[in-house]
Amino acid sequence: MRAKGIKRHGKDVAFQAVVTGVTLAITLLLLYPLYFTVIASFSEPYEVVKGNVLLWPSGFTLDAYKYMLEEKSIWSGYGNSIVYTVFGTLYNVLLTIPAAYVLSKHDLPGRMLFTWFFFITMYFGGGLIPTYLLYRDLSLLNTRWSMILGTGVSCWNLIVCRQFFASSVPNELYEAAYIDGCSEIRAFLVIALPLSGAIIAIMLLFYGVGHWNNYFNALIYLTNSKLHPLQLVLRRILIQNQDMANQLETMSMSGEEIEALTRRTYLAYAMKYALILISSAPLLIIYPFVQKQFVRGVMIGALKG
């Protein structure tokens, strides 16, 4: 006997249509900036500046990418950002995961004291000047270590990891392992880590995005341009673009000089979108691979019972 479908009322259909429409509208609003960045990077710079690029590329050109390939500082910054992100993220995760595992143990002596020791750093910091003096005394200024060792543990990430170990890994597994003579370190390596793929992926994503987008530490602690990350290189290019635009308005030059400077200004304006696309590419490529784990990780502790 064929089961009959559930009859839907007109109000339910209307509500579903409204929800679908709002969801599509929000999705388009979120995707359009990325789409505009893509088409603007392939459009004629003059058309982009005049605002003629809205839905489709205008005057297809690869000049922005050609200019970007010739700019050595961009690829130097790209390589620096990759180094800072990879090693900085590994350093953060290697500190956060073991610390969270230890703090998840209810029988740990002084557990609340250690927890508050980390927790208080969410609200109070040493300040920029004392931190700079500390970096100077440790000889970290103008070194790659200032970008890698700057922040060892994020307290918020530590709390999320601790909640995962406390609620998602059955305590019976540890008890059975202890009965068989398993040590605490081996329990962490053999039991906890293999069951922590979701939270490790989340920590890699959180810390990785933070390192990739970090420019403030480089602005304060690095004066050697060869060590600057990509974000600082992009900032310098944007400032140079603004300076060229100001020169175009104030300086008196010949017609050929004005035309050359105008072309370069327009090209730099279009290259900005190419740089945004290139700098965002690693995150856009990595995210689909950790998306499943990301959804699981952010829901940790959301459901009780």
Image (cartoon, rainbow, N blue to C red):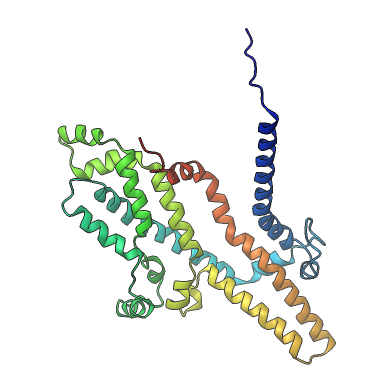
Q: Nearer the viewer, residue 138 or 115?
A: 115
Foreground pick, 128 / 138: 128
Looking at the image, which residue is at 72% across and 86% down? 247
* Quarter of the figure with residue 125: bottom left
Whether residue 145 sits left or right of residue 173 in the image: it is right
* Displayed quadrant of residue 121: bottom left
Q: Position of residue 191 (x, y in %)?
A: 28, 38
Q: Vertically, is 278 above or below 24?
A: below
Residue 279, placed above or below residue 146: above
| Residue at the top extreme of this rendering | 1
**Furthest residue toward right:** 255
What is the x, y in percent for residue 297? 43, 44
What residue is at 69 percent from the left and 48 percent from the top? Answer: 25
Q: Quadrant of residue 92?
A: bottom left
Q: Against 13, is 141 above or below? A: below
**What is the x, y in percent for residue 103?**
25, 51
